Structures are given as structure tokens and as C-alpha cells.
Amino acid sequence: MEFMGFDQEKRTGDRLSAPVWPEAVDVDVLSLSELRERLGLIKRAEARLAAMKTTTLAAYTSRGGEGLARRVALEELQASKQQARRQVETASQLSRVPETLDALGAGEIPEAHAKQIAKAASRGPVDETVLVEAARREDFGTFSRTLRDHQHEQSDDGGKSLFEKQRERRSINFFKSPDDGMFILNGRFDPLAGNKIEAALAAEERRLRKDDKAGEQAAFDQRLADALENLVCADSRDSRPQGTTLVLTAEWDMVNNQIADVRLPDGDQLPMSEALLLACNADILPCVFNTKNQELWVGRKHRLATEAQRAALIIRDKHCIGCGRSAVWCEAHHIDEWSKGGRTDIDNLVLVCTSCHHNIHVGGWEVHRTSGSAYELRPPPRPYAHLRPWRSRPDTPSQEPDPFPETGISTGHPANRQPVLLS
């Protein structure tokens, strides 16, 4: 496979000439490893095209004005009015971070990463070199956390101004759809409010799930809607308002004899001023999770994880070890299964969301310890990933031996082929 446009490309002033696209091939003849390599080529092509679109829109804006640039985006890119406005705004932001734009144009960083850097730079000081280097090697979720930590570090007030700016952008929309008469709710919340709301919703959703009768289980999104209705509309005349269990972590600054680096459950840093406000109205339960004096090793006494174990898991794993979903939606999974004699001990438990839990018990995914106390979820090994599919007539099953007889996954006839994930 050859990546068309890389060798032929020439630079004329600030304009890129020659087409940029992966060579057209029949993907049905490619092996899994070749398909994976092709996705990498496509990623670089998308990045380079995004840089070309950015420089073009920025140049059009500088000559014709923002209004005309939006009109051109509407007509030539067939964008909506909102999309046109956003694309022109993004082009303007990216033009002010040249190092990021160069990395995007070289296909070294994805478009989404570049947009994040540009947006952050428009809101406050950033070290572009540090962020571009991180964007080259980190996935979207990891880079998002890196960027938020960087903004926190770059602020000269312990992240207070950044937090206040986030809070200023809070909003909620609630309206009745004219199509079906259903009400639609969407909103934006600062990290502290968002974590509190998420924790309360997750706790109520778990309660509803346990209360559901067998055979009458509602779908997850339906339970979530019910949970929100319960929290907002519950009669509170004879009961206290719904509380929220929020697990914060902090380091002890031995030099200054005080806590430091306070973080929310999702890893976001919390300004010390906000942490102190929380402490005024919270039940504080200081915990040290490296001692067996606490109820973290309960053996066969309990099957389900205790509240102390859940708190310890949130601090240790931080999120689902498979897909990275927020810890408040996760379940505690026994690495050595309970039904086979596994113990409910903290070193035999990991956080996984419902979907990843299903992958473990049904799909054969496995928990692996990476380093120290870190765990990750890996798919079952798939042999022959480097082999090309067996070609046969569309209406004739292939005679190639099935390399995955135990799973039912075949590389033979196209109708029998199933997606296979690579670790």
C-alpha cells in the first residue's frame, strides 16, 4: 500500500498542492494487520486534509471577512449554519497555534487533539510544544486529562480562574419536542457539579436496578431517566435531600505540612478553595488504603464489594479498566471468579463497566496486571491475524480451515466473518 500524495506533495507559499488520500484497494483481501496499518494511513490523511481546510478557511476569512467565510462553508462544504460558524471559529483558533497546525499538517496528531489545543490556547496560556508532544503519543481521553492538568499548572492561582471560567459556561436546556411531545434535556456543568450529579445519578440507578423485578428490567437509559425524575421530583417533606458520595484524593505536602493536588474521581484537579468549601459541609472519612486493618480483605465473607472496597477501587483504578468509563458506573469484578473460589479481596477486584463485564464473562476478555497496582483488559488472543482472507465465490463457502473453531469466528466466507479486535 502506498500513501498517495505524500511524495508528490509540493509546497507553494503557504498552500499545499497535490491530492492527499490513501490508495484505493480492495479491503476484503487485506489481513487484519494490514487493515490496522491502513487505518493509521487514513488517520494521517484526515489530519492533513483538516490542516488544508483550516488554512484555506483562515485565508478566506482574513480576506473576505468572517461572514463571507461562513457563507462559503455553507455552500462549498454543505455545512449547517452552526457547523459553518464552528469551522470558521476553529480555523481562526488553529491559525494562532502554528506549531500545532504544522503537526496537524504533517499528519502527526489527530484533528481532535489539535482542536483541543487551539481552544485551550484561546482561553489562557499554554505551552504549545509540551502539548503537541503529548498529542503525538496519547489517545483522546488521556490527552484530554493531560490538557486539563496543563491548564491547571499554567494558571497562577491554583486553577481557580480556570474553574471559574468553566463554571461561567454552565447551562441547561429543557424543551418540549414538537415532533413527538417528549421533553428533551441537555446541559453543561463544571467538573465539580458534574461529578456530584453523576455520582447521585449512578447511586439512584443502582438502587432502581436492584429493585427491578426479574423479567421487568428496564433499559439502562430508561433507568437513568427514572433516576433523574426521582432525584428531582421526590417528595422531600419527610426526608432529607439526596446526598452525594464523592471520593476525593489528595497528596500530603510534607514540606508545607498540608494537603495538595486534590483530585475529583475522574482525575480532574480541584482548586484548593473548592476542596475547602466541600469539606465544610461534608462527612469526611479519611482513609489509608494500604493496610489490612480496614475492611478491604473480606475473603469469602461477602460476595459483593463493600463500600470501603468501592472507594479504594475508585482511587486505584480511577475508571473502567477496559474502556475508561467513569468509575461511578462501574461494577467490581472478581479476577479469580467467586463461583470458582475467588475471594472478595481488594487485590482480586477491578472496576469494569457493564459492557466490559459482559466481555469478560461471555467474550473471553482477560484482566492483566500491567505494573504496580495497574490493571488493563485485553481481548482474547486471535491467531493468524497476519493472514489474508481466503477468496472464494460470494455464493460458495470457503474450504479454508476455520482458525477459530471454539469461538465461531471464521475468516472464510464473507457472511461468516465477524469483527475481531486487536490488542
Image (cartoon, rainbow, N blue to C red):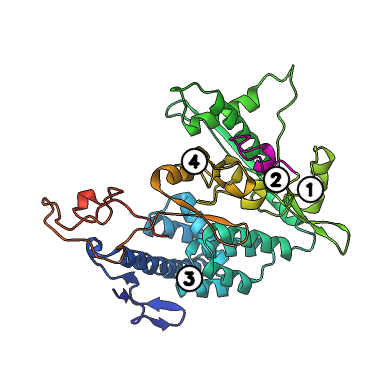
Question: Which of these two is toward me, 6 or 311?
Answer: 311
Tell me, for residue 192, which label it has, or none.
Answer: 2
Residue hosting label 4: 340
Residue hosting label 1: 274
Query: Is residue 242 left or right of 206 when viewed as pictured?
Result: right
Return the disc, 3 or 2, that comes first in the chain's sequence: 3
Q: What crowding class fits label 4: few (fewer than 14 Cα within 10 Å), some (14-19), or many (20 or more)? A: few
Overall secondary structure of the magenta stretch? loop
Mark 3 near mark 2, Cβ–Cβ under 8 Å? Answer: no
Choose mark 3 or mark 4, whichever is in front. Answer: 4
Circle 3 sits in a helix, a strand or a loop, which is it? helix
Residue hosting label 3: 55
Return the disc, 3 or 4, that comes first in the chain's sequence: 3
Choose mark 3 or mark 1, whichever is in front. Answer: 1
Choose mark 1 or mark 4, whichever is in front. Answer: 4
Magenta extent: 294-311
Return the disc, 1 or 4, that comes first in the chain's sequence: 1
Mark 1 near mark 2, Cβ–Cβ under 8 Å? Answer: yes
